[in-house]
Image (spheres, grey):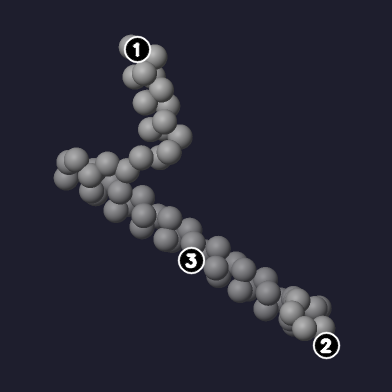
Amino acid sequence: MTKETLKAALASLTEDEYRFEHHVDKLTNYIRFWQVAGESEKTSMRTKERLSQIVQEGRFRGGTAP
């Protein structure tokens, strides 16, 4: 392998390049994005639940002071 080939491979790994060359690539990317969307929803639910708990405890959440 040449130095340029190694640099290209490293850039590909660090930039998380998405490929759409083959039908399998499309499926792999769909699954990846589906998983990321699920993680985002779980994060949102945890945040909403925690902020709700803070309000129930009577603590200040931010914004204009009461």
Amino acid bearing label 3: Glu
Residue sitting at x 32%, y 43%: 18
Quadrant assignment for the C terminus: bottom right
Q: Which residue is mark 1?
A: 2
Quadrant assignment for the N terminus: top left
Q: Marks 1/3: CA distance?
A: 43 Å
Mark 2, Cα crowd under 10 Å, few <14 / some 14-19 / many 20+, is few
Amino acid bearing label 2: Pro
Instruction: From the viewer's side, name the closer residue of 37 and 6.
Output: 6
Instruction: From the viewer's side, name the closer residue of 8 and 18.
Output: 8
Of the residues under marks 1 and 3, which one precedes in the sequence? Answer: 1
Q: Is residue 50 above or below residue 34?
A: below
Q: Is residue 56 above or below residue 17?
A: below
Of the residues under marks 2 and 1, which one precedes in the sequence? Answer: 1
Secondary structure of the residue carrying numbered label 2: loop
Instruction: Please identify the residue farthest to the front as the structure is shown.
Output: 4
